[in-house]
Amino acid sequence: MLFVCYPKCTTCQKARSWLDSRGVTYDFRDIKQENPTRQELEDWYRKSGLPLKRFFNTSGLLYKSLELKDKLPGMSEAEQLDLLATDGMLVKRPLAVGDEFVLVGFREAEWAERFGA
């Protein structure tokens, strides 16, 4: 499994501690140092079954400064994916990516269901 997060984010820290305390193994990736590619984002989006809007970090400063709340509804899926790929800080985190699943954000009940903890 790939665990994608921003190490300074408290929610990411909580998710990482949660995984570690349950012995879940993962490959760690700092989203600020290694932004997901457009292809990765598209693959994860398709695999997740979630609306693309869920992949945006709507509480982030960059999201707000770009006024994406107003702009996203008028953008195509391709444009949204291209935008997400420009900066990891636009992407909702943490992300847990496995062969059969993608979890976006840390919801403990959802993670417990996925990891059987």
Image (cartoon, helix red, strand yellow):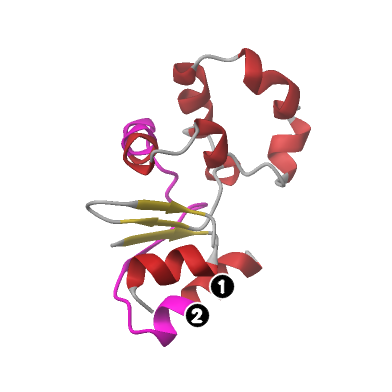
Q: Which quadrant is the C terminus positioned in?
A: bottom left
**Residue at figure coordinates x 73%, y 28% from the top left:** 69
Quickly name the residue at label 2: 17
Regarding residue 8, the answer to whether it shows in the image is no
Image height of 96 relative to 71, above or below: below
**Image coords of residue 58 (percent x, y):** 68, 41
**Image coords of residue 107 (percent x, y):** 55, 63
| In contact (CB < 8 Å): disc 2 and disc 1 | yes
Measure the C-alpha gap from mark 2 to mark 1.
Answer: 6 Å
Circle 2 residues within 10 Å: few <14, some 14–19, many ≥20? few
Q: Give the range drawn in magenta.
A: 18-43
Circle 1 residues within 10 Å: few <14, some 14–19, many ≥20? some
Q: Which quadrant is the N terminus positioned in?
A: bottom left
Q: Single out the residue that lies furthest toward the left.
A: 99
Image height of 82 relative to 3, above or below: above
User: Hey, what amino acid is under mark 2?
Assistant: Ser
Closest to the observer, 62 or 73: 73
**Residue at figure coordinates x 48%, y 52% from the top left:** 31
Q: In which quarter of the image is residue 7?
A: bottom right
Residue 41 lies in the magenta stretch: yes
Quickly name the residue at label 1: 13
Q: Is residue 56 left or right of residue 114?
A: right
